[in-house]
C-alpha cells in the first residue's frame, strides 16, 4: 500500500467549557480554553484538530456544537468531533456546526448500523471510528472499551475494527487506554496488529512524550497519523520540532505556506 | 495579522456565493470573511446583483450538484457572469461541474465552461501499489501550464500542501488550462484549472490552513481590481 503523508493531529478532550487532560482517560485536570488552544495549534501548523467531549456519553448530552462553531470561525483545517454522538441527527448537528468528520465509539458498539448511516450520508472519509483499546493481561490482544475506558465491551479490538471498516468506517482513531496520558510512548504492538489487517488510515493516540515516540508510531507502528495531547497542552514539544524530527528521518509530512496567518 | 489580507485596509470586497443546496458552506463563508470579504450568500439567481466575484462550492455527487444548480435556476446566470468576464471560482465538486461532462455514475452533463471530463482517480500508484480512494488529506501543489502569477496561487509557494477529499477530478481537454497538480503518492491529481477569469480548485481552500487563506485572499485581490 502506497503511503500518504503522515498527519500531525492535536487531540483536545473537552469537558465543557474546559480543555482537560487525563491519565488513562481518567484523573482529569483542567488545562485551559479549548478554543484558545485550538487556535494556537492551528497557528503552529497542526494538520488537523480532534475534539472529544469526554463526558457527553455519561450524561447523554452534546455540548460541543457551540465550541465547534466558534472554532470554525478561526481554524481553517479539518476538524473531527466526537464524544456522545448517538444518532444521525447528532452527526448532522456537528457537521452543520463546522465539523468535517465525526468520531463515534459507544454508539457504534451499541448499534453498528450508525457507521453505515453516517458513511452513506457524508462519505466514509467523514466516519471516524473511535476505539479505546486496553491490552488483555499477558496477551497480544486488546479489548475495546467505551465511556473513556471505563466500561468493557467484550469485543476484540482487531475484530471490531475489521467489522466497522466493512460497515463504512473510513478512518480509525485508535487510543490505547493503558498508554494514554503516560507520555511513555504509543502502544506500538496495538498499532501493528491493526494496520496489519485494515487498509483505512489509522490515527494512533495515547502516550506521546518525546520526538522519538512520534517516529516509532510511524516507522514501527505504521500509523498514518498521530494524535497528540499532553506534549502540546503542556508545551513539552512544538509542532515544528516534531515535524522537523520526522523530516530528518525521511518521513513525508505536510508543508504549509510560510506566510503567517 | 489579519491586516495583510485584502479588504481589511480598504472597504470589504464583496463576493457572491452560489448556494444551490449542496450542503454546508459555513466554512467557505467564514474563510472568505477571515480574509476580508463581504459574503453574499445567494439561494436564488435574483440575488446575483452587482456581482464582481462568484464562488461555486460543491460537495457530494456531481449529478446532485448539477441538479441543484439547474433546479434553482443558476445555470444561465453563471454562464452570463462568465461571458461578462466576472471572476469565478469553483471549489471541489463546484470545480468539477465547470467541466463538459462527468463519468461519475454514468455520463452527466456539466456547465461546459472548462472543456473536459470529470474522471475517477486511478487506483494504482505509479510504483504499482494500490492507491486509496477517496484521496483524503494534504497534498503538495505543483505548477502546470498556467502561470501562478496573476492567479489566486500567486502568494503560494510551490510544494506547499492543500487539503483534498475526493474520488474524481477534472481532466481538461486541453492541458493548457491546468494551473496546478497535486502529487498523491506520486500520482498526479488535477488540483487547479483556469480558463480566462474562471478558476476551479479540487482542494478545499477553506480547510487548507494558511495556504488556503492565501489562495482565497489572492482571489479577492483579483476581484478587487476588476
Image (cartoon, coloured by chain):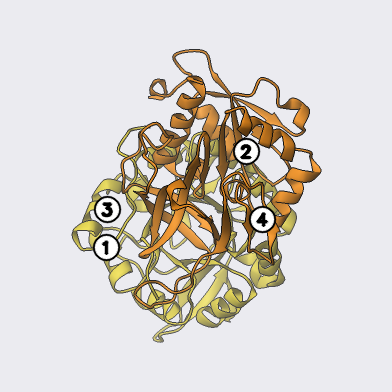
Chain colours: A yellow, B orange
Chain letter, disc 1 residue: A
Disc 1 crowd rating (10 Å Cα; few below 14, some 14-19, many 20+) is: some
Q: Who's the residue at 57% across and 78% down the image?
A: A160
Residue depth check, mark 3 versus mark 2: number of the one nearer the observer: 2
Residue depth check, mark 3 versus mark 4: number of the one nearer the observer: 4
- Image mark for residue A242: 3
Residue depth check, mark 4 versus mark 2: number of the one nearer the observer: 4
Taking depth in this image into account, of B70 and B215 the one nearest to the observer is B70
Residue B168, relative to residue A142: is it above or below?
Answer: above
Total number of numbered labels? Answer: 4
Q: Distance between the residues labelled 3 and 1?
A: 11 Å
Task: Tell if the residue under mark 2 belongs to the same chain as the one under mark 1.
Answer: no
| Residue B126 drawn at (x, y percent) | 36, 72
Q: In which quarter of the image is residue A248?
A: bottom left
Q: Who's the residue at 65% across and 58% down the image?
A: A122
Would residue A165 be seen by someone viewing this image from the given angle?
yes
Q: Which of marks 3 and 1 is nearer the N terminus?
A: 3
**Badge 1 element:** loop
Q: Who's the residue at 66% across and 55% down the image?
A: B62
Q: How far apart are marks 3 and 2 (CA)?
A: 32 Å
Disc 3 crowd rating (10 Å Cα; few below 14, some 14-19, many 20+) is: some
Q: Name the residue under label 4.
A: B62
Q: Mark 1 points at which residue?
A: A251
Q: Mark 2 points at which residue?
A: B26
| Residue B142 drawn at (x, y percent) | 35, 50
Chain letter, disc 4 residue: B
Identify the image quadrant of the N terminus of chain B: top left
**Badge 2 element:** helix
Amino acid at each position: 500500500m502506497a503511503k500518504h503523508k503522515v498527519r500531525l493531529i492535536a487531540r483536545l478532550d473537552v469537558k465543557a467549557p474546559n480543555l482537560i487532560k487525563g491519565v488513562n482517560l481518567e484523573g482529569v485536570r483542567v488545562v485551559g480554553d479549548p478554543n484558545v488552544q485550538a487556535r494556537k495549534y492551528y497557528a503552529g501548523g497542526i494538520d488537523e484538530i480532534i475534539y472529544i467531549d469526554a463526558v457527553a456519553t455519561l450524561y447523554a448530552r452534546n455540548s460541543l456544537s457551540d465550541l465547534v462553531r466558534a472554532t470554525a470561525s478561526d481554524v481553517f483545517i479539518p476538524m473531527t468531533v466526537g464524544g456522545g454522538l448517538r444518532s444521525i441527527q447528532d452527526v448532522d448537528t456537528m457537521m452543520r456546526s463546522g465539523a468535517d468528520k465525526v468520531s463515534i465509539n459507544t454508539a457504534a458498539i451499541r448499534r453498528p448500523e450508525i457507521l453505515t448511516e453516517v458513511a452513506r450520508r457524508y462519505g466514509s472519509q467523514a466516519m471516524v471510528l473511535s476505539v479505546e483499546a486496553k491490552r488483555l493481561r499477558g496477551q497480544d490482544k486488546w479489548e475495546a472499551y467505551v465511556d473513556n475506558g471505563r466500561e468493557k465491551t467484550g469485543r476484540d479490538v482487531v475484530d471490531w475494527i475489521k467489522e466497522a471498516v466493512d460497515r463504512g468506517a473510513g478512518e480509525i482513531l485508535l487510543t490505547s487506554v493503558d498508554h494514554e496520558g503516560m507520555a511513555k510512548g504509543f502502544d506500538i504492538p496495538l498499532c501493528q496488529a491493526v494496520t496489519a489487517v485494515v487498509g483505512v488510515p489509522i490515527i494512533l493516540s495515547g502516550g506521546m512524550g518525546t520526538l522519538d515516540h512520534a517516529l516509532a508510531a510511524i516507522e514501527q507502528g505504521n500509523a498514518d497519523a498521530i494524535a497528540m495531547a499532553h506534549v502540546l497542552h503542556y508545551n513539552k514539544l512544538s509542532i515544528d520540532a516534531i515535524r522537523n524530527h520526522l523530516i530528518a528521518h525521511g518521513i513525508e509530512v505536510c508543508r504549509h505556506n510560510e506566510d503567517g496567518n | 495579522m489579519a491586516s495583510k489580507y485584502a479588504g481589511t485596509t480598504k472597504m470589504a470586497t464583496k463576493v457572491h456565493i452560489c448556494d444551490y443546496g449542496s450542503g454546508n458552506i459555513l466554512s467557505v463563508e467564514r474563510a472568505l470573511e477571515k480574509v476580508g470579504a463581504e459574503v453574499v450568500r445567494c439561494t436564488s439567481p435574483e440575488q446575483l446583483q452587482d456581482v464582481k466575484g462568484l464562488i461555486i462550492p460543491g460537495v457530494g455527487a456531481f449529478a446532485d450538484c448539477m441538479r441543484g444548480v439547474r433546479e434553482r435556476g443558476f445555470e444561465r446566470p453563471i454562464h452570463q457572469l462568465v461571458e461578462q468576464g466576472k471572476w469565478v471560482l469553483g471549489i471541489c465538486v463546484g470545480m468539477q461541474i465547470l467541466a463538459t461532462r462527468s463519468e461519475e455514475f454514468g455520463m452527466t452533463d456539466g456547465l461546459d465552461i472548462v472543456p473536459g471530463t470529470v474522471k475517477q482517480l486511478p487506483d494504482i500508484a505509479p510504483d504499482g501499489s494500490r492507491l486509496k480512494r477517496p484521496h483524503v488529506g494534504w497534498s503538495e501543489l505543483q505548477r502546470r501550464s498556467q502561470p501562478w502569477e496573476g492567479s489566486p496561487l500567486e502568494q503560494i509557494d510551490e510544494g506547499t500542501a492543500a487539503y483534498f477529499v475526493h474520488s474524481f477530478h477534472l481532466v481538461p481537454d486541453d492541458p493548457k488550462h491546468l494551473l496546478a497538480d497535486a502529487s498523491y503518492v506520486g500520482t498526479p491529481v488535477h488540483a487547479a484549472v483556469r480558463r480566462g477569469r474562471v478558476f476551479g480548485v479540487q482542494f478545499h481552500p477553506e480547510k487548507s490552513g494558511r495556504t488556503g487563506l492565501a489562495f482565497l485572499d489572492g482571489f479577492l485581490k483579483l476581484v478587487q481590481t476588476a
